[in-house]
Structure formats: C-alpha cells, structure tokens
Image (cartoon, rainbow, N blue to C red):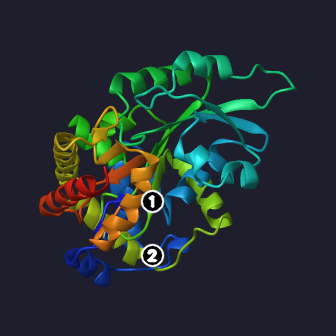
Amino acid sequence: MIDLRSDTVTRPSEAMRQAMASAEVGDDVYGDDPTVNALQDMAAKLCGKEAALFLPTGTQANLVALLTHCQRGEEYIVGQKAHNYMYEAGGAAVLGSIQPQPLDMDADGSIPLDKVAAAIKPDDIHFARTRLLSLENTHSGKVLPLDYLQKAYAFTREKGMALHIDGARIMNAAVAQNVELREITQYCDTLTICLSKGLGAPIGSLLVGSKEYIQRANRWRKMTGGGMRQSGILAAAAIYALENNVARLKDDHDNAQWLAEELSKIGVEIAEPGAQTNVLYIKQSPELAAKMGPWMRERGVIISAGPVTRVLTHINISRKDLQKVVALWQEFLHQHA
C-alpha cells in the first residue's frame, strides 16, 4: 500500500532494526542506559543546549514541557491551530491546570507578536500569570522564518517569558532552510523533536533545554508514566535516524513539490503555499472527497480524503509510488469529475 496519510506511518528499515537489536541497554529510570544517554547527549549537542530527555511520544514530550514551564493556574500563549492546543486532548489543562490562551496564526504559521503582547495578562489577582509562548515549527508543513524566531525570542526576553517550540518536524524546517538545527534552536528555551515521523524511528520524542529544566522535566516524565527501563533498544533507532535520515528529508520535500506540480497539471487545486516541506494540502469538493478515499484504497493508495486533503511524503514513499498516485488521480477525475 502507498500510505499518504502521514509521515507517522513510516517503518524502520532493516539497518535500523539491526541497530536496535544490538543496542547496549541499562535501566533508564536510574539513568543507566548508555544508549539513551548517548541519544540525549547527541540531541543536546545538535540543538546547542545543555541537556535532553527521551520520551515515548510527542504528546507526552509537549505535555511534560508545559508542566515544567508552568505551574497550576498559569498560562501559555499558543496558536489557535497548534498541535499542542488542538490535538493533544487538552492535557495541559486537564493534568496541569495550565490555562491556554490561543491566538489566531498568520498564514506562515507564526503568531503576530503584537497579538501576543496584547494577550499577556497584567500582574493582577484576577488573571492567570502568562509564563510561556509556544510556537510550532513546522506548522502544517510551513517553516517559521528565522527572522521571526529571532524577534519572538527577543520579545520573550523583554516580557520575562520562556519560548518553547513544538518541533515535531523541526528537522524538516532545518533541511528546508538549509541550516544547522542549532541556527533555529538558538531562538528558544526548549523544544521537542519527534523521531517517529519523517526520521523513520518507530517511537520516541526528545525534549531539549537547560540542564536545570531537564532535571525538573524528568520528574514530570516519571509522574506521567514516561519512565522506561531498557529503552536503549528504542534510543538506538533514534540515533540511527539522526545519523542517517536527516539529510534525506530533502527527498521527501522534492517529492512533495513534484507531486504538487503534477497534480496541478491535471487540474487538481493545490492549497497555498504549496509544498514547503513534505506536507501538501489539496482542495476538492465534498462530493469528490467522499468517493476518493474508498476508490483510492481499492487501488492500493491510502489517503485522508476530504474537502481539504492532507498528503504527506516520507521515507517509505518513492517517486515511482507518486507517479502511480498521479495516474490514479487522473483516472479518478475522468470517472467522477
């Protein structure tokens, strides 16, 4: 099957499985797993930060990040459509009593800093204290401009706030901008990195920040059930991914751009701004969308068909696969449009 629903569907390669099978392990709750320790050191170095923490999932990594930044009754400012506001089950509010203050985002995924300034609460007993600005990079495949991040970081210094980046696909951002990861992460206090999307590992995310911050985050990881034992088997996959699967993300970006161009040629409407990374949005009528999903699945393509259809390229999708997708799409339009 050609699965275009998400880059979360990626499967570990044989070489990654071999790395997992031969991993040296210990008890990570005690801090004794050498492979986990090596992964955390590698992540901290890549980001130019002091320390990192390995967690099972991106949702838990973002939750632990927020719990570590904010106390009960405090607030984080976040994009209205940000993943750690909309799609993580309200965990910060439910488990941390942390108040989200969502704001509308600009088309490029940024939150205008004048809107952030207006949303910061005064020091008054009636209001939650505003502690954190949370940004997402990439957001829906769109890369936050470096000059915006620089301004946002300076803004949060001025306002006495911290800045967190949900970096589920931050490696895609670095590759798209052709910069080292630390050129992006210099403009945040903390960030998360997902290992199980385009990087191709089967599980895991990293939370990166200062040594003192990560020490506090480790307690929250334990409290929320993220302390794992011989997790070096999983960390080995992550190390393999960071060493071998970052530069090749450009192939996914190129494939997404190629797919956008070819679909446009056959009359498919591509939503702006097209493919900046590995994410593409396609507009179609609800009637066509309702027919497309089952029709494509019968022919070996899994796609989340809707009036706005999200398509993601990834390590398990080749150009030959996409050529088949375009041919099928054209056939579908001839039959149903």
Residue 311 location (% of width, % of height): 33, 52
| Front residue of this view, candidates 32 and 53 | 53
Query: Is 294 above or below relative to 336?
Result: below
Q: Position of residue 128 (x, y in %)?
A: 78, 32
Q: Residues within 10 Å of mark 1 (few under 14, many from 20)?
A: many
Query: Who's the residue at 68% across and 42% down the image?
Result: 70
Residue 153: x percent and y percent?
Answer: 47, 26
Mark 2: which secondary structure? Answer: loop
Which residue does the image show at 34% across and 44% down from the upper left?
282
Q: Eyeballing the image, is 287 above or below 136?
A: below
Q: In which quadrant of the rendered view does residue 29 lie?
A: bottom right
Position of 283 relative to 22 (above/below): above
| Residue 13 placement: quadrant | bottom left
Residue ranking furthest to the right: 125
Between marks 1 and 2, how big is the CA–CA gap? Answer: 12 Å
How many marks are shown on the rendered structure? Answer: 2
Q: Left or right: where does residue 316 sit relative to residue 39?
A: left
- Which label sits on residue 231? 2
Q: Is any part of residue 141 visible from this angle?
A: yes
Q: What x and y, as percent, mark residue 1?
A: 28, 73
Left or right, residue 204 beside residue 318: right
- Residue 203 lies left or right of residue 85; in this view the side is left
Foreground of the two, 80 or 56: 80
Given the current orientation, which residue lies at the most extreme bottom position? 21
Residue shown at the point (32%, 73%) measured from the top left: 298
* Nearest to viewer (mark 1 / mark 2): 1
> Which residue is rendered at x = 46% and y = 48% of the image?
286
Give amino acid for label 2. Ser
Mark linked to residue 205: 1
- Mark earlier in primary sequence (1, 2): 1
Q: Nearer the viewer, residue 153 or 326?
A: 326
